[in-house]
Amino acid sequence: MSVSIPISQQFAIGIDIGGTNTKFGLVNHRGDISYHGAILTHKHERIEEFIDDLYEAIIPAINDSGGIEVIRGIGIGAPNGNIYKGTIEYAPNLKWKGIIPLADLIGKKFGVSAKLTNDANAAAVGEMTYGAAIGMKDFIMITLGTGVGSGIVANGELIYGHDGFAGELGHTITIPGGRLHPGTGEHGSLEAYASATGVARTALEFLDRQPYEESLMRNYAREEIDARVVYECAMEGDKLALEVYDFTGKILGLALANFVMFSSPEAIIFFGGMAKAGDLLMVPVRETMEKHLLPIFRNKVKLIFSELKEADAAILGASALVWEMKQA
């Protein structure tokens, strides 16, 4: 875009690609989101169809804001996003398999520069710039949604690793030989238990193992039982639903103990739909985490929730990539 347009009149497009939904917004340099929108991710079998749908959803907002000339660039947060190459690589929760050159494809479709990073890293940048992590130099962002994502900040810098894929804490093995993760083929990963998908699977397992235990969850067909149903039943005091959260929290707490002893963060910040469970999840998380920490790490790490509106952290973090771009 032309550098003659003042930065105060420019916008970045921030895109957050999740396993179920893709959310986006137009963001100015101060972090104000002037437009929100969303499309379904999982209904698109081909990446080209997804990009076409995304373009059609965003272009009216671009036109209303002054046209493509005022768009400084596009920042994208995506599962298994490689910031070095602009690619999504072998994302287990997406339908598009293999290596997808997403930044290049979206940049060409829109006619502006595009940059991509891991979705949880984007959320961490958003939180560090605008939310609960302002002023923090060491923290871990945990996103609890369709999957379990993470962004690790140490000494004020995101940890990317030599190939751009550092920080996949959701795929660390928490229970060796445990539950199969259908997307990766691994057994016992944190994501297989602590994600919204994992909670639903735990609920179904508990219902099967305790066939004579009364539960509000039995009022639903098996295919209707998801994390929302489990939460609503738990809030009604359902014993089995409460057990699901206790079980999930203990697994997550064990994993967090390992993460704390790795990077000694000031805080762990939770983001995403599962975080709305609040104390249902966090009480067993805290108890189990502290139990498994060495004494030098105990009672030091804050467990806090994102201070940004849902999805805003990832959108803001993705848009921040744009302001870092060199302009022609």
Image: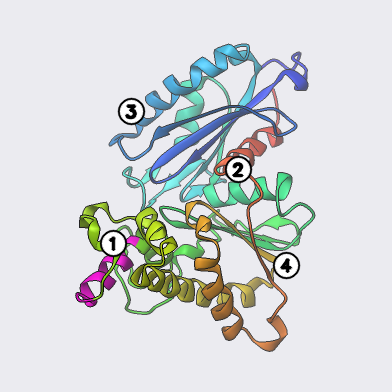
| Quadrant housing residue 190 | bottom left
Q: Is residue 299 magenta?
A: no
Label 1 SS: helix
For label 1, the crowd category at 10 Å Cα-Cα, with few meaning under 14, some 14 to 19 and many 20 or more, is many
Q: Residue type at mark 4? A: Glu
| Tag shown at residue 49 | 3
Q: Identify the magenta region.
A: 200-212
CB-based contact (under 8 Å), mark 2 and mark 4: no
Residue assigned mark 4: 266
Foreground pick, 75 / 190: 190
* Residue at the spot 76% in from the left edge and 22% down from the top edge: 7
Q: Which residue is mark 2?
A: 309
User: Which image quadrant for residue 52?
Assistant: top left
Q: Amino acid at mark 2?
A: Lys
Residue 209 is one of the magenta-drawn residues: yes
Label 3 to label 1: alpha-carbon separation: 37 Å
Identify the element where label 3 is drawn: helix
From the image, tell me which residue sits under label 1. Answer: 217
Residue 42 in percent (x, y) is at 33, 40
Going by the numbered disc 1, the residue's amino acid type is Met
**Sooner in the amino-acid sequence: mark 3 or mark 1:** 3
Quarter of the image that includes the C terminus:
top right
Q: Earlier in the sequence, mark 1 or mark 2?
A: 1
Ranked by sequence position, the earlier of labels 3 and 4 is 3
Q: Nearer the viewer, mark 3 or mark 4?
A: 4
Image-quadrant location for residue 75: top right
